[in-house]
Image (spheres, coloured by chain):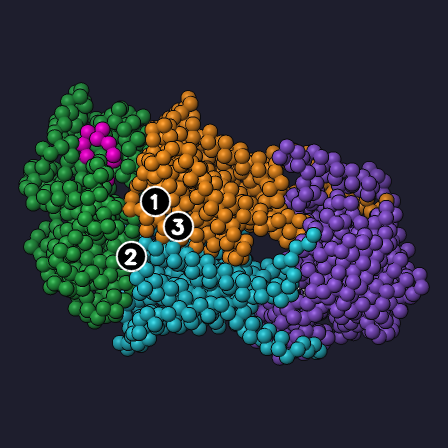
Chain colours: A purple, B orange, C green, D cyan
Amino acid sequence: MLTMQDVSKSFLGVRVLHGVSLDLEPGEVHALVGENGAGKSTLMKVLAGEYAPDEGTITLDGTVHAFSHPVQAQAAGIGLIHQEFALLPHRTVAENVFLGREPVRRGFVDRRAMERRTAELLAELDETGITPRTLVKDLSVARQQTVEIVKALAASDVRVLVMDEPTAPLADHEVELLYALIRRLAARGIGILYISHRLREVFDLSRRITVLKDGRKVATLTTADTTADEVVRAMVGRELGSYYPPRAGPEEIGEPLLTTAGAGNERLAGIDLTLRAGEVTGVAGLQGSGRTSLVRALFGAAPFTRGHMTVTGRALRPASPRQAIRGGIALVTEDRKGEGLALRQSVRDNALLVTRAVHGEGAQAGGVAGLLERVNLRSRGHDQEVQYLSGGNQQKVVIAKWLAAGPRVLLFDEPTRGVDVGAKAAIHTLVRELARDGMAVLIVSSELPELIGMSDRILVMSDGTLAGELPAGAGEEDIMRLATASDATPEGSAA
Amino acid sequence: MTAVRTEAPVSAAPRRLPGAGRLKVTDPVVGVWLAAAAVTLIGWIVVTIDGGQFMTQSNFTGILQNSVALGLVAVGQSAVILTGSLDLSVAYLISLGTLVAAETMEGGSVVTAVLAVLALSAAVGLANGLIVTGLKVNAFIATLGMAFILRGYIEDNYTGPAGDVPASFQRLGYDRIGFIPISVFLLIAVAAVLWLITKRTRLGHHMYATGGDEHAARLSGVRTRRTVIYAHVLCALCVGAAALFLASRLGAGAPWAGTEARYDLDSIAAVVLGGTALAGGRGGVAGTLGGVLLLSVLDSIFNQLSVDPFFKNVVRGVVIIAAVALYARPFRRRAKARDEARAKEKGALA
Amino acid sequence: SSDAPKDDLADDPAASEQAEDGDKRSEFFDQADYDRQLELTKATPEGPEGKPWEQMLDPASGGMVDTSEYAMEGGVEGAKLCFSNAGVFNPWRQVGLKTMKAEVAQHDEIADFTVLDAQGKDDKQISDIQELSGQDCDALIVSPNTTATLTPAVEEACGKIPVIVFDRGVETDCAVTFISPIGGYAYGAAAADFLVDEVDKGGKIVALRISPGVDVLETRWSAAEIAFEKAGLDVVEVKFTDGDPSKAKSIVSDAIARHGRIDGVWMDSGATSVAAVEAFEDAGEDIPPITGEDQQDFLQAWKDKDLTAIAPAYPTFQWRTPVIAALKILKGEEVPKEWTLPQPVVTEENFDEYYKEGMPPLHYGACGCEELPGYPGDWGGE
Amino acid sequence: MTTTTPSATTTVFAGVGRRLGTGAPVYVLLAVLLAALAITDPGFYEPDSFLAFIKRAAPLVILAAGQYMVIVSGGFDLSVGAVVTAGVVAGAEFYGSYPDAPWLLVTAGLLLAGAIVGLVNGLISTVLLVPSFITTLGMMLILEGAVFYWTGGSPQGVLPESFRSFGRGEAGGWLPWAVLACLAVGAIAVWLMRSDFGRTLLATGDNERAAALAGVRVPRVRTLAFVLSGTAAALAAVLVAGFSGVSAQAGRGLEFEAITAVVLGGVILGGGRGSVVAAMAGAFSLQALFTLLNLQGVSGALESTVQGFIVIAAVGLGAADFSRLRRRRSQPSEGKSSS
Ligand SMILES: Nc1ncnc2c1ncn2[C@@H]1O[C@H](COP(=O)(O)OP(=O)(O)OP(=O)(O)O)[C@@H](O)[C@H]1O
Ligand SMILES: Nc1ncnc2c1ncn2[C@@H]1O[C@H](COP(=O)(O)OP(=O)(O)OP(=O)(O)O)[C@@H](O)[C@H]1O
Ligand SMILES: [Mg+2]
Ligand SMILES: [Mg+2]
């Protein structure tokens, strides 16, 4: 149905795609994998008309296309769901879904038709939590993604749907919903190009897998005939070996560095936890269970309003990030671009931001080199603006920024979201090393395997409280049981 | 199953009755009209205490009449600000518009004059739009540059009031129906057209989208450049209407008709008072009209109280800042209310 | 200041076509007006000696107006005067308004004096006039923001109450009286003639103007241009300063650098004269003959630096006259249709009449306010 | 650490481009204008007249440096023109009451007042969350209104020579104080932007949330930028007052000139990018343009038209220069349309 032939593309004279070819059949889920910066998104943007290719052709149902604008691609039946959402938060769902192609009746936008059609599409997807008049800003991330999908479906007779890391912002249970949705779409004969860094999803969903590396196609594999190791080898070009570094032995776990007792705020209640030196504590939970709220509270960004908290033995319930940082706490946020980095500043300036802001030791340029080496940053130099780095390397800059401040307690919120397998492994190793160095580490992750692989202990959250604690090596079922424990509460009290 | 359940509170909370959300007191549009009403009331009391009469017909006429010119400009300005742009050239365009109108009417017909002014406005708006989108010059600088260009042209070609407006056309500026000046109907008509365009047409939807997130809009197939250009043209046409109104009222064209009244900054102030975000994407014409009315009522009160004109500026400055500070508050309050609601839910669960 | 009246608007536009050469001057130059104004400068005013604001020049030309129809029954006691002011956007108008208010304060018979300020907006001034004529004013004084554009509003008001227009004119003769000094041609010519006398033929003149496109200033320049042309002076620069002293200073400094020597400086108003003087000082040059206005800072510089100078005034005392005229009208006394006030020129000889020690820099000497209550404190003097 | 090595040429390009940053076009513009000035007026580069040129440019350059701080932190300062006017008028008014006040005290007082205006601007913008465009627009109205209300329309005093010599006179008889002030402000600005404050200011303008989470006291940093801008404006007021004396419209339009200068310097409205030296070069360019137009004797009235065209063209070319080039290289097929 769809063929991309020998597509090449350069930015600023740097070649990003080298003659990549790809084909897609109706109803097929075709996965596209590769390290950060391998060119996956670029290839898809070429397909969706956002970039014009330097060379190569796109053939859809026998017609050769050269899109110069996304609209043309949409009209031809190609929908793209972006890695970053393209929704307008202050507009309604219906307005977003029909943006750029509002139905017009007698010169005016036919709002009713728009809302009716949106409602129909939502119903088709079994989505009951959204009404066409809801403002997008009032929706959860997962629902926003559904709106993106509805938007793509409403565009035209969609033949090809491209999903660029659709699960990155989702929690596990939402991923299941997405799976179901994707299968339904595929059953309708829509071809789906699926990009993800999570191999498990790739194997769950796809019929074929195309691996990109450094802008070149390495292989197209049939999912049924391959293994995860083989795919990883193709992506990375080497064996990764064991995914996770070894856990801490009991002798490596030291004194408590951070404790809370009965802490809470608007979103959290009864938080009692202890983070110890040398230990990696994992936090699991469903979307909206309060994990992010927890780390933000510990970090003083959305502070606790109740309860007691100590950091390195002293009473400190930070009221602002600044206080937390002074107390030795660091937070790697889940939203790297929005909250972690000043994208137009250099690697050096980002790495030094915390020290400059809090400790006022700006000029220690020598230290930066050491730090960036420690996190194994790959960049074109310390003056490169971080916006031009790949996701994994951006995350390394964020970590370096915190290490520069010499923290004792490190909080990670979704540290490997949108990071490729290679960089992921590097981050895992780094996290473990930091714990070895005597820091207390807390990791929030929606990827259960990662959480299980990394944690010495797992806390499970549910509805803003700590629902339980599990030892290292607990299984996914145990976690899910605790996470969904509130299901047991009667209907009435939740409403 | 689980997913739907755990998420329900998040999405259910903000779900409002359709349409109900548009009438909230915290909505700047409603807020500014309420503020205008409140200021009227306060003005009434203060002026009465001062021994004057505020609630008179002639005073209402004055307030309405004084809203027309600024109203027309501000309505146009809302269109550009909605798309995330800005027009600082409006003042000079008004001046030039009155001159062109009056001169054309002197020699030709009213119809030709109206067409000439609108054509001129459209051309200037188009140029602004093209500079902003094509040359990628920031709107602030682009329209400031355009203002300089127009200024030079005016100063080079005119040495004072010029042209002559026939009595028939002057009726636009002077006639009333009852105590309502007919020019108010011009304002209402223009505002209604702009309201329809922004709220009910594709162009309007695209204007909101472009102002809200240009990148997202472009990816969705909105021709953002074209939208910005249209917005600039619309704005300029409104300014043209203001120029025609002023020409009818002044009976001649005046090279400083727009600049001495500071229509550029005043119109932006009115738009912002009306709750339109300077960054674009939120707000609209209805609020702007409220903002204009508010300024007009204030002026009238100052007039009644014979407040020193310099002191007026002080009050105006304070009002503008205070109003926008108030708009910034409800968002925080709303967020807080949401937090509290969530906390209650949690309490129920625990 | 920039508040000379537009003198020629009431005249036949055809008259302006007769200027000889095809340059820009011809667009607004009005030979008849020019001649009339120069004639008036030589005329002897009628009226009380030493009170120029009550004097009138050639009142017969426009005829006297019988105002008995406006006379208040039972005298002017308790009269309410209203004033629609264009604005107070420059020091000249500020001094003027103070003077006017002091004049009002002198008259106990005026019970109420309402001022609406249009802040430079023609549109607002039209509304102001409508509003005032709707109130129970006994007489309305108007200082129009723009000639021409306020005509309809003034006409409307004329039907209701006696209207007095001053400073700038309007295109209607419905007002009971129009009060103004002689005008821009006389102003420009006075300054130019001084330079013609002081500077040798072929001397280099720099002309500084406020801004283009202002009718009331164009007359000043066109009169000067004629004088310079006739006398064979070489006008090397004609520049606009926007009334900004630092711009003026830069322009003059550049001119000195470029032309080596400047023999005279002509100004269309006083705001930037001192800056020009300083430009010569800073360049280490002698200050050539220079013209200014009766603004205190220029008079001060003139005195301190012993300049060869002249300062035509566009007198702020004209702000007193409308009040006086209003009372006359309400008493039923006759007033001239066109009340032309003398337009003094500050020279070496009469310098002390206009220079008053201790007044603030932006004060205007020809305010005729020395005898008024509150002087000098209310004008910022000491 | 591993540094991936792209081709040597790209590194060189990237290096030069980065050094000049988005400011590159302004240096070209400045060079062109200065060359044009040299051709128009051969005496322009004689030390005296060149110093006089810098002296004249000084207030705008200082304003641009202050405005840069605010713009780069993501704001606008429309009140600087009003601060200049208010400063000049207030200075004169003050001397009206205390004719023998020492000039240093009055200057310091004005600087302090400017800083306070900046502080208020900053607090309203950061604490009350009013967009700075509106805050400073309101402040402009308030200042102009208040100062004239206070002085009853015009200032009452005369500025003494001692006070004025800072803007008018020369140190050692040849080097204008204004030039020294300009150099000092430039040096301080560069030092500030290299300091912790400057770096955090840039980061704040780039991503406020990230900065806040990194412990930056965002309100304080942004307020400080306004304070600097207010102080710079007050300094400009002292220079303007010295240069040309009392005037009721000393600062008229200066806010727009300052913003134009900063944008000419390639600083992006919205914050996070641009260099202060380029912003100051933008101010010099603007002043050079004014001087050139003056010397060229462009018909007085058309001067502003020419100025408008040049500013638009310069900013347009600046915007085009890099982004266009990049797009052209990367998307040779952009113009081509399908079907
Ligand atoms: N607009 C652009 N300008 C310059 N370089 C770009 C641009 N977009 C992408 N690149 C570069 O092209 C390369 C491929 O990027 P792309 O986003 O396609 O990678 P990806 O495989 O999607 O990575 P990720 O897994 O992190 O999303 C990267 O080196 C990136 O830096
Ligand atoms: N009422 C609210 N007002 C403002 N921000 C909120 C509100 N509720 C949640 N958030 C923010 O939204 C994000 C989601 O937080 P929440 O505690 O609801 O779920 P979570 O489990 O932390 O989410 P995730 O699974 O994505 O980590 C957090 O950044 C939180 O601070
Ligand atoms: Mg990608
Ligand atoms: Mg989270």
| Mark 1 residue crowding within 10 angstroms, few (<14) / some (14–19) / many (20+) | many
* SS of the residue under disc 2: loop
Dot 3 amino acid type: Leu
Q: Say which residue label 2 marks.
A: C241
Out of A200 and A256, give the one closest to the viewer: A200
Dot 1 amino acid type: Trp
Q: Say which residue label 3 marks.
A: B150
Check the residue under mark 3 and report the chain it is in.
B
The image quarter in which residue D115 lies: bottom left
Is residue B261 something one can see in this rendering?
no
Alpha carbon of mark 3 to alpha carbon of mark 1: how far?
A: 12 Å
Q: Position of residue C178 (x, y in %)?
A: 19, 34
Note whether D231 is above or below A104 in the view shown.
below
Q: Nearer the viewer, mark 3 or mark 1?
A: 3
* SS of the residue under disc 3: helix
Marks 3/1 in contact by CB < 8 Å: the verdict is: no
Dot 2 amino acid type: Thr
Check the residue under mark 2 and report the chain it is in.
C
| Mark 2 residue crowding within 10 angstroms, few (<14) / some (14–19) / many (20+) | many
In this picture, residue A240 sits left or right of residue C68: right
Marks 2/3 in contact by CB < 8 Å: the verdict is: no
Check the residue under mark 1 and report the chain it is in.
B
